[in-house]
Image (cartoon, grey):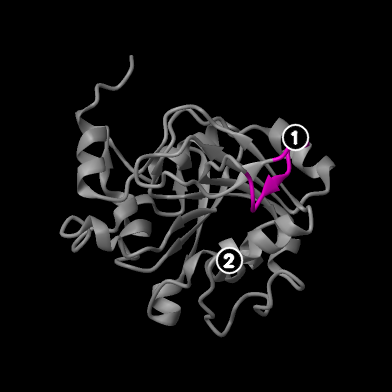
Amino acid sequence: MILAAGRGERMRPLTDATPKPLLDVQGKALMQWPMEALASGGFTELVVNTAWLGEQIPERFGSRHQGATLAYSHEGRDFGGALETAGGIVRALPLLGDMFWVVAGDVFAPDFVFTQDAVDRFAASGRLAHLWLVPNPAHNPKGDFGIGADGSALNDAAQKYTFSTIALYRAELFAPPFCTIEPGNAQGVKAALAPLLRLAMDAGRVSAAMYTGRWADVGTPERLRELNEKKRPA
């Protein structure tokens, strides 16, 4: 699942006429980077949620893109706005499997490789989520979560890292006792993801690993400009 429903307030005025995931980064739409990386890893059934200027995304990519099929969860059309991350995932669950990748469409992580081996390890672990964390950027110096000696994701740790938004999930995480939204979220409940993750972490059901490749939360025009000023590797 590619998360592409946000308004992108901090990116204004660039996002006044263009949804943030369609802004150009080094010659491609921002969300195109994870879409193509997933397809390259063999994950060719993609779900995209939309809200702000959401009609532009299917107009751009249609139902197929470079070997991947795309389905859409139109939160803006159905509810008048984005449902936040957990609300959006629950809304899209009927389009997803029992296990699935999620990555934000406004994060640039061109070195991340989506592998079946990662899915197999996750399946064997019995965990409800596996998160990839990154070294803390300047705009999030305190980090989000820690990593225990056994690979568990931790709410409390001496060293915390930033959640990259790249993760594997089981649908079970988005059901009681961790999530109380009805399956399919027909009511359009807005809900953040972090509270669910923290509950599951406290139950020992979340693991984490570090990703140390290139990564940027493209949250401001300045960060976008910095990325586009950097020379792409050959």
Dominant SS in magenta: loop
| Residue that lies at the very extreme toward the bottom in this rendered image | 187
Name which residue type carries label 1.
Ala
The magenta segment is 148-157
Mark 1 near mark 2, Cβ–Cβ under 8 Å? Answer: no
Q: Quadrant of the C terminus?
A: top left
Whichever of callouts 1 and 2 sits on the residue coming sooner in the sequence is: 2
Q: Is residue 207 magenta?
A: no
Residue at 24% of width from left, 26% of height from top? 230
CA–CA distance in space, label 1 to label 2? 34 Å
Residue at 74% of width from left, 58% of height from top? 202
Towards the viewer: 59 or 151: 151
**In the drawing, does residue 2 fall left or right of residue 107?**
right
Is residue 174 shown above or below 130? below
In which quarter of the view is residue 90 placed? Answer: bottom right
User: Where residue 190 sits in the image (x, y, percent)?
Assistant: 51, 76
Q: Which mark is residue 92?
A: 2
User: Where residue 53 sits in the image (x, y, percent)?
Assistant: 29, 66
Towards the viewer: 11 or 182: 11
Is residue 174 shown above or below 134? below
Give the residue at mark 1. 149
Is residue 219 shown above or below 192? above
